[in-house]
Amino acid sequence: MKKDFVFISESVTEGHPDKLCDQISDACVDHFLQQDPFSKIIAECAVATSIVFIAARFTSHATVDFPYIAREIINQIGYNQSTFNAKTCSVLTSLKVLPSDEYGYTDEKTLTDDQIDAIPVKNQVTVFGFACNQTPAFMPLPIWLAHKLSRRLTSVRHQKILTYLEPDGKTQVGIEYRNRKPYRIHSITIIASQNKNSGPESARLSDDMRETVIKPAFADEGIRPDEKTKIFINPDGPFITGGPSVHSGLTGKKCAVDTYGEYSRQSGATLSGKDPSRIDRIGAYAARYAAKNVVAAGLAEECEVQLSYSIGLSRPVSIQVETYGTGTVADSKIVQKIKDHFDFRLAGVIKQFNLRYLPSTIKGGFYRKLAAYGHMGRMDIGLPWELTDKAHLLAGE
């Protein structure tokens, strides 16, 4: 396994068309669960010039206005271009009401262990959870820094520090590793969309990005750009307007941005737009929870947990652990510890993380907040799968 290498991860702002779609999809999930916590909902979205398309399948007692949700999200993100805005874009929907199933209105909080064991998953998937000690959030440093830059790029726009910025943007951070540990910042790339009427010249844009985005984002980091760090600001020239009028978007296209920046594996399954009964979504959260506690317990410096589920079974058919040679005990022993202390059954995960009720208890919804800047490693929401409350159990055996 390589010990000296450069690894690059990207993030995108909340205004990137793919992330716009993710937020609309997850806002739909929130609206259903806020009214009916037992809703089953799959919502997918696509955007292009002046058009939003939402395809949804659901069974629920809730009444949801899909076009209203889409326009609300577009307005909140800040799209007011003549070619794409909340007032004039067309919102098309394709909706299908599904029949309810026997588990549709069962509250997991009331179930016994045997009852939880009797509820199978309804789809097949292999999910991955990862954690490492490179950051306080136990996330790989490249994606951690890329998200910080994206959030800062959005912040200076919302605060009108740089009034010429538009919502669309991308960031990329390359880290040079030595002996598998972050050593220095290799490169930084920022793609910032600009208003065509007031966009600055490239020299001013570069100075603005360095002073208002890059410098604050790295202010509290142990590793910062040095004189050899390559910094690219809109290297392909001005990025005018951006957004759906320039490039289309689709729910679920940014799986690496949602997880670990491809430093670790992730499932090909989309995370956004699915209610908690989908194991391809919540299984990824459960795997992250286990991996983070393994690292927090000091059992490894890096840990990837792999869970494989088959339709009709409640438990994963396979649980695998990879610590990349950093484990303090054998990987097989870590697997056994995980099996002893973590519940990966569908109903068990829903129950422990309270996933049906979080949209009603968190202001502004819950799942929509996950749809930009990552589902993992978030320190701003209080995610149940980011707790390290089982680290002492893993370390104590």
Image: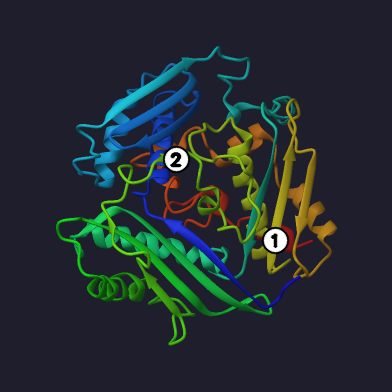
**Residue that numbered label 2 is attached to:** 367
**First of labels 2, 1 by sequence position:** 1
Between 354 and 247, which is closer to the camera in this rendering? 247
- Horizontal side, residue 280 vs residue 3: left or right: left
**Residue that numbered label 1 is attached to:** 303
Rendered residue at 54%/48% (across/down): 255
Secondary structure beneath disc 2? helix
Q: Position of residue 157 (x, y in %)?
A: 24, 58
Question: Rounded to the nearest whole Å, what is the CA distance between mark 2 and mark 1?
Answer: 26 Å
Between 351 and 55, which is closer to the camera in this rendering? 55
Secondary structure beneath disc 1? strand
Image mark for residue 181: none
Q: Among all residues in the image, which is located at the extreme bottom?
A: 227
- Horizontal side, residue 90 vs residue 55: left or right: left
> Taking the image as drawn, is residue 334 in sight?
yes
Residue 396 position by quadrant: bottom right
